[in-house]
Image (cartoon, helix red, strand yellow):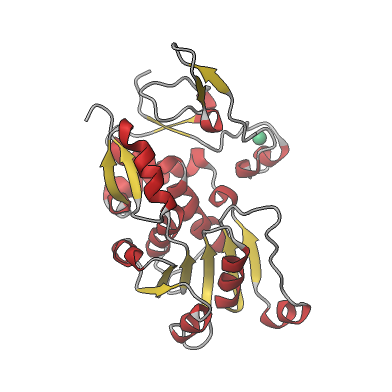
Amino acid sequence: VGDPVVLDMSRACRNCWPCIHGEPWLCEETRNSTPAGRLEDGTTAHALMQLGLFAEETVVPRNYTVPLARDVPLDLAALLSCGVTTGVGAVRNNAKVRPGESVAVFGLGGVGLAAVAGARMAGADPIIAIDVSPAKEELARRLGATHFLISDDKVARQVRNLTEGRGADHTVECVGRAATIRLAWSSARRGGQCTVVGFGRRDDMVSFSALELYHFARTITAAPMGSTDFGREIPVLAEAVRTGEFDLGALVTHRIGLEEVPEAFERMKRGEGGRSLVVFGG
Ligand SMILES: [Zn+2]
């Protein structure tokens, strides 16, 4: 009682087949249900992922929490629950980036920026950050990007130019659109790997010709929640934050009060800034 915790949005049951076989991010018991409760005045409140956020207090089952060491900066630790762990996890667990490998990250929202930071922690070089908005460049470079490109139909060629003509060893798609997945796939080298982190639509089809699949011999893989065991990896990331290896604070562009949350969502929809951090009692 009284221990700081991060809420675990993967909410793995630890009992089903994927959980027992070390893949809790594929837990069969996890449902993306958003049960509704009622506030005192009768208005309906939705608890995203059964966690209940944007609130000063919440009640969750014990297995939805990951205990933290006490000397971790708790305001920043709040970011470890979702996008940050997903972005870093995709680089660590799916791409398994090694020092000196080239990484291109498509889409620089919270997840993509975290993937850039993950690539830096893995010792990748170059780290090419790609977005439709030039305003993301400064943020991406602060998190470890060595190059920044604007996403358009020439981007695969530009990535090849930055990687001795080959294409990147790893591309990481953090948008969830067929067009970007295709760009990310085309930007990987022959034999390289394209990791899809973005959550896309059912009817958004990606197509590859039979010949190019064979010729380019690339691997395409998906990373739901960064293929992360939150219970095991959040404490590791928290330690990297504590030691300064992971500059998590660089992701935060706005510190806001609870009443500014709608404004923060509007910024996110416009693709502006990094993370907005809600500070309680500020
Ligand atoms: Zn499970």
- Within the image, what quadrant is residue 191 found in? bottom right
* Numbered marks: total: 0
**The N terminus lies in quadrant:** top left
Residue at horizontal 41%, vertical 54%?
A: 270
The residue lying furthest to the right in this view is 210
Residue 26, compared with residue 200, is above or below; it is: above
Q: Quadrant of ligand 1?
A: top right
Say if residue 33 shows up in the picture. Answer: yes
Residue at horizontal 42%, vertical 60%?
A: 108
Residue 100, compared with residue 202, is above or below; it is: below
- Within the image, what quadrant is residue 182 found in? bottom right
> Left of 231 or right of it: where is 28?
right
Image location of residue 166, percent across then percent down? 53, 85
The residue lying furthest to the top in this view is 40
Image location of residue 28, percent across then percent down? 70, 37
Image location of residue 232, percent across then percent down? 49, 41
Nearer-the-camera pick, 135 or 123: 135
**The C terminus lies in quadrant:** top left
Image location of residue 230, percent across then percent down? 51, 41
Say if residue 73 shows up in the picture. Answer: no
Nearer-the-camera pick, 201 or 252: 201
- Within the image, what quadrant is residue 25 found in? top right
Residue at horizontal 35%, vertical 48%?
A: 275
Nearer-the-camera pick, 157 or 72: 157
